[in-house]
Amino acid sequence: MIQVLMIEDDLELAQIITDYLASQNIEVTNTDSPYNGLSMLNLKKYELLILDLTLPEIDGLEVIPKIREKSDIPIIISSARDDILDKVMGLERGADDYLPKPYNPRELQARIKAILKRINTNEKKALENEKKSDFILKEEDMQIIFKNEVLNLTLAEFDILKLLIQRNGAVIAREDFIYTSDHIEDDSSLKNIDVMISRIRTKLSKIDNTKTYIKSVRGIGYQLI
C-alpha cells in the first residue's frame, strides 16, 4: 500500500480521509501534532504528506521549511484557509499542491496518485539519464560524482552543476542559476555565475581534460554537453 503521513488536528475529518483512502490502497497515518509529525518522518519512509495549516503548536506554513530541511517528500496542503497569500507562501516554501477544504476525498486521492505518478516517471528518467551520463547526482548526500570521482564543490557550485545535470542538455539562463539556488544571493551579478562556472570547469578538467563539458551559449547562459 502507498504510505501517507497526515498532520491534521480535525480528527473527524482525518478519520473520513483515512477510511476512504484505505479503500483505495493508500494507508494514512495521522497525527494532530506537527512536532510529532516531524519526528515520524525520521522513523518511517512515507511517500507523501498531507498537511493542514491551522495547527496547534505551530502554523503549517512554518512546518514546511522544517520538513524540507530533512526530506523532499511530496506535500499536499489541505486547508480551509483560502487566502491567496497562504497558497502562494505554501507553494513557495516547498509544498507541491494546495487543496482547499471542503473537498471530496476522491479529489484528494486523484491528486495523490497524480503527484506520485509524476515523481515515479521523473525518477525513472533520471535513472536512465544517469546510466548514459558521466555525472551521477546524489542530492541527499549533496554529492556529484564525475567519472567515478566525487567532485569537491562549494554549495553554490553544487547547485549550479545540479541544475545543469537535471536539465539534461537544455540551455540555462544565468538568471535561472540565481533563482533556483538557496546558496547564491539574489543580488549576485551574472558575472559571479561566470566565475563559478569557470571554477567548475577547472575541477572537471582535472579529471578529464579531453573535452569541455559545460558549453557557453552567447547572450543566454550555459548547457551541459
Image (cartoon, rainbow, N blue to C red):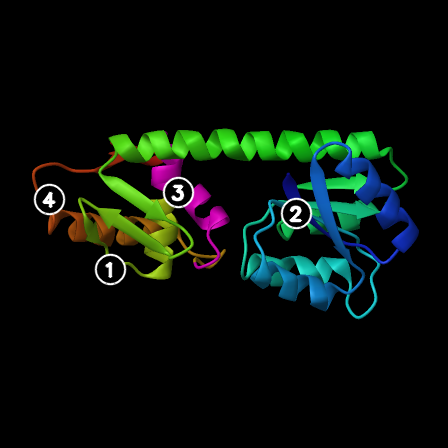
Task: Kindly identify which residue carries mark 1.
Answer: 152
Q: Is residue 90 left or right of residue 192?
A: right
Front-lying residue, 113 or 135: 113
- Mark 1 vs mark 4: which is more N-terminal? 1
Residue at 80%, 70% in the rendered image: 57
Task: Kindly identify which residue carries mark 3.
Answer: 163
Q: Residue 71 in magenta? A: no
Query: For residue 95, which numbered disc appears in the image?
Result: 2
Q: Which of the 4 image quadrants contains residue 100?
A: top right
Q: Amino acid at mark 2?
A: Ala
Say what secondary structure mark 4 lies in.
loop
Residue 222 image point, x, y percent: 31, 37
Q: Which residues are magenta?
A: 163-183
Task: Kindly identify which residue carries mark 4.
Answer: 208
Residue at 47%, 32% in the rendered image: 122
Residue at 78%, 33% in the rendered image: 23
Reply above or below: 106 against 84: above
Q: Amino acid at mark 3?
A: Leu
Residue at 24%, 51% in the rendered image: 200
Q: Amino acid at mark 4?
A: Asp
Reply above or below: 157 against 118: below
- Mark 4 vs mark 3: which is more N-terminal? 3
Crowd tier of the residue under label 2, counting other residues whose Cα lies within 10 Å: few below 14, some 14–19, many 20 or above? many
